[in-house]
Image: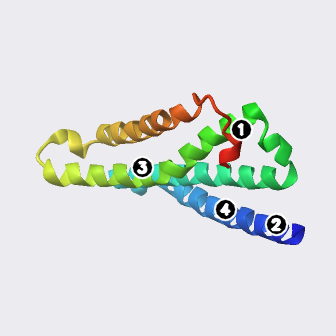
Amino acid sequence: MTDIIYITTILQVSLFSLILFLAFVYSISIIFIRRFHHRNNMLILNACLTIIYSCVYFIIYFTMNYFDPELLFAPNMCIILFYAYNIASIEIPFAFVIFSIHQLCSIVYNTKPLFKTKRWIGICIAIQWIAQLFISLPFILRKEPVSSDF
């Protein structure tokens, strides 16, 4: 049984590491190549950053779960990991929702100058991150233990 858990842990960490590497390379190319500094690429960069966050979270979680599960389910650590899990699980879909909202506003309100600026992109990204932090906030304020939920 331990061999199966070890193999699945190695496989999960390897896949998340590969995804992390690819998202990192893609985001670095958007940041450092000037011709990629377009509005839509800023939203793609945001999606890459959310993927990087999710991959880092799941790599840490699976590694801790295999090597030190007692630390993983400590009361204070459990609350932090549950909050981070909720953020990691909703942020990638939120990035695509924000991208869709940006595209919709750009098409419907194509004559409005606000929707053609990088300021609008910043507003969209800020709304996404603030919304996911607030949506996940009730999981910190729970009174019952959360370790049984993992």
Identify residue type, mark 3.
Phe
Q: Write down the residue under mark 1.
A: 78
Q: Write down the residue under mark 2.
A: 5
Spatial distance from mark 2 to mark 4, Cα to Cα?
16 Å
State if disc 1 and disc 4 touch (CB < 8 Å): no
Identify residue type, mark 4.
Phe
Identify residue type, mark 1.
Cys
Where on the picture, by quarter, is residue 93?
A: bottom left
Mark 3 surroundings within 10 Å by alpha-carbon count, few (fewer than 14), some (14 through 19), many (20 or more): some
Residue 16: which disc?
4
For this rendering, which residue is in front, 4 or 55?
Answer: 4
User: Can you tell which of label 2 and label 4 is closer to the viewer?
Assistant: 2
Q: State the image coordinates of residue 75 (x, y, percent, origin top left).
A: 75, 33
Label 4: state its secondary structure: helix
Label 2: state its secondary structure: helix
Q: State the image coordinates of residue 140 (x, y, percent, origin top left).
A: 59, 31
Residue 94: which disc?
3
